[in-house]
Amino acid sequence: MPARSAAEAGPTRGKRNVPPVRLNGHVARRKCPPEPCVLWDSELPGFGLRMRPTGYKCWIVTHRERGIKRTVTLGSVAEVSADQARQAARRRLAANRLDGLPRPAAPRRKEDPPLFRDYVEGFWADYARHWKPSTQKRNRWLIAKELVPAFGDVALDAFTRADVVCWRDGLATRPCAFNRALPVLAVMLAYAEQLGHRRRGSNPCRAMPRYKVKERERYLSAPEYRRLARTIDQIEPDWPNIAAAIRMLIYTGARMGEVALLRWEHVHPPRLALPDSKTGPKTIYLNAPAMAVLDSLPRRASGYVFAGPDDPERPPRVDNHWRKVRKLAALPDVRLHDLRHSFASVAIMDGVSLGLIGKLLGHALPETTARYAHLADEAVMDAAERVCSSLANALGLSA
């Protein structure tokens, strides 16, 4: 007789079997035992509650997929209620049983809330205008590549927190994808509430924790700056507008989109007055090298400042050319946005305060500039070391 799976044999705690119970909120509040434990549900085979000695408790569901046992985490007890977890487990088990079989769609009434995939186009037509063009492009991609594949067949009124937690857990190896797509899903479900497709205040994305992702930090060193400068000189005969745009990024710390979309009507030396940016209207302060970049370009009454010579109404594709530039400069891991980070790094090393750096970069919140605080600490420590060395020399001591 073949051995039964853990779910079929009953709950497990260490090596002992524990009688199944109906999993509910009361059971979920039980104190965790001194060793790992899985309590299985008495009504829904495969649905369980995993408990760890650390106090962590989560809902799970097990099933067999092509003969291989799969265990899926539905979410922690703190995030997902017992009823929500049971519904999610039931849906997953049902979908697994139907895997490979024809699945005729249940007839839907006109008054029923639409499926997520059918809701997308109407939402986009109504709501996309609230986003900037660059945000529209990114969010459209996230909806098509992340949200529709995950939730396309879910009715808008059927979304639960367990569904969102399952989706989050499935993207554990791609945390940035989840962090970017979650706000889009939250907006879509909030708008569904306004349309009456969901109960008010039922958004399952509310207070959903995002993955903690370490911010990528890449700052150019002095030798790297010199290599980049030589490469810019090298490409200038063929791509004068691209060379000028990259120099402007270096000298101002502006965002790539702010430079690529800069128009002559925004140029008011010694400032650039942008009517719109990531954080709203913005002033970019022009230093002497940045002014020299503008003076080197043919001045037009209108059009994009860094457009090619043939079409002033076509913004430059700086990012496309940057791939070749960084390869020629032997900087394969440097992004255009790293020029902005490096601008802040140089400013800090020169003693500029975080407050002024935030103003130069156009940060709306001090918290955004605070990411550079550790560089400021390093600069202060370096200054302290230099003072100590000077004092030691004056006193005839070894520092």
Image (cartoon, grey):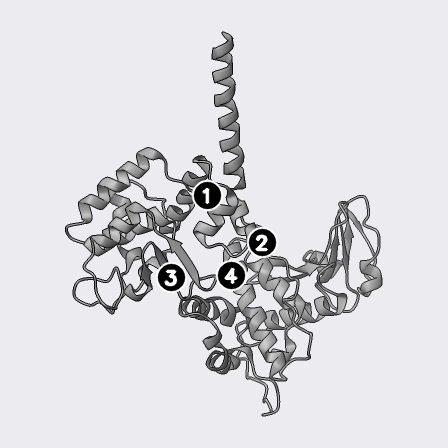
> How far apart in space, not on screen, are marks 2 and 4 (Cα)?
10 Å
Front position in the image: 166 or 277: 277
> How far apart in space, not on screen, are marks 1 and 4 (Cα)?
19 Å
The mark nearer the N terminus, 1 or 4, is 4
> How far apart in space, not on screen, are marks 3 and 4 (Cα)?
29 Å
User: Residue 11: x percent and y percent?
Assistant: 77, 56
Label 4, on which residue? 180
Mark 4 Cα within 10 Å, few/some/many (few <14, many 20+)? some
The mark nearer the N terminus, 1 or 2, is 2
Mark 2 Cα within 10 Å, few/some/many (few <14, many 20+)? some
- The residue positioned 47% from the left and 78% from the top of the image is 124
Front position in the image: 207 or 234: 234
Front position in the image: 102 or 293: 293
The mark nearer the N terminus, 2 or 4, is 4
User: Residue 86: x percent and y percent?
Assistant: 72, 68
Quadrant housing residue 267: bottom left
Label 3, on which residue? 273
Q: Is residue 148 visible?
A: yes
Q: Do the numbered discs 1 and 4 sit on residues whose CB atoms are within 8 Å?
A: no
The mark nearer the N terminus, 1 or 3, is 1
Label 1, on which residue? 217
Q: Please, what secondary structure does the residue beneath circle 1 have?
A: loop
Q: Please, what secondary structure does the residue beneath circle 4 have?
A: helix
Q: Amino acid at mark 3?
A: Ala
> How far apart in space, not on screen, are marks 1 and 2 (Cα)?
18 Å
